[in-house]
């Protein structure tokens, strides 16, 4: 699970090299959230398997959902297909201005989830 999450995050982040400030903020936030999720999964894997209803386990699940939402928001903002994964690593982002608000909200939510996960350690 951890390797799959890291692979998806890496494939998502590669096309974003050389991006605008909003895209860079999304990339940095996704990386921070991914790191927090992986660290929490490593620490709580055993206890979450035994009792998945623990607060930390729910935070981890919320973090994964938030990361997925952020990835979808970046894909929409960049005009990339949200159904084909991963995006072409050579694709350039062509900002869809009408999707900027959704991307900003996804960045804010992901940043808050990162703080919550780190704070629960």
Image (spheres, rainbow, N blue to C red):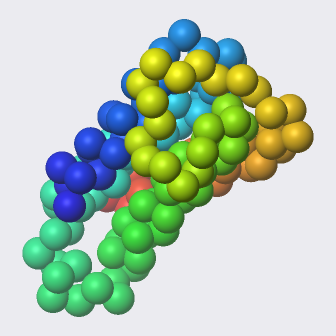
Quadrant in the rendering for residue 20: top right
Q: Quadrant of the N terminus?
A: bottom left
Residues 86 and 25: in front is: 86
Q: How many marks?
A: 0
Q: Is residue 29 left or right of residue 55?
A: right
Is 78 displayed left or right of 116 in the figure? right
The x, y position of residue 79, in whole percent, is: 69, 36
Residue shown at 42% from the left, 25% from the top: 89
**Location of residue 40 by image quarter:** bottom left
Q: Is residue 90 above or below residue 121?
A: above
Q: Position of residue 54 (x, y in %)?
A: 33, 83
Which residue is depicted at the point 29% across and 51% down?
5
Residue placed furthest toward the left: 46
**Residue 70 visible, this orientation:** no
Task: Say which of 87 and 23 sits in front.
Answer: 87
Most extreme residue toward the right is 98
Of 67 and 89, the residue lying toward us:
89
| Residue under the point 54% across and 46% down | 71
């Amino acid at each position: 699970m951890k390797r799959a999450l890291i692979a998806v995050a890496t494939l998502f982040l590669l096309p974003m090299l050389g991006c605008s400030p909003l895209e860079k903020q999304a990339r940095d936030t996704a990386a921070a959230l991914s790191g927090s999720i992986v660290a929490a999964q490593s620490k709580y894997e055993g206890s979450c398997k035994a009792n998945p209803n623990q607060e930390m386990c729910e935070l981890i699940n919320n973090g994964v959902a938030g990361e997925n939402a952020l990835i979808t928001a970046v894909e929409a903002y960049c005009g990339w297909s949200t159904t084909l994964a991963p995006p072409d690593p050579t694709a350039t982002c062509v900002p869809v201005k009408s999707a900027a608000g959704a991307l900003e909200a996804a960045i804010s939510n992901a940043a808050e989830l990162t703080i919550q996960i780190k704070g629960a350690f």
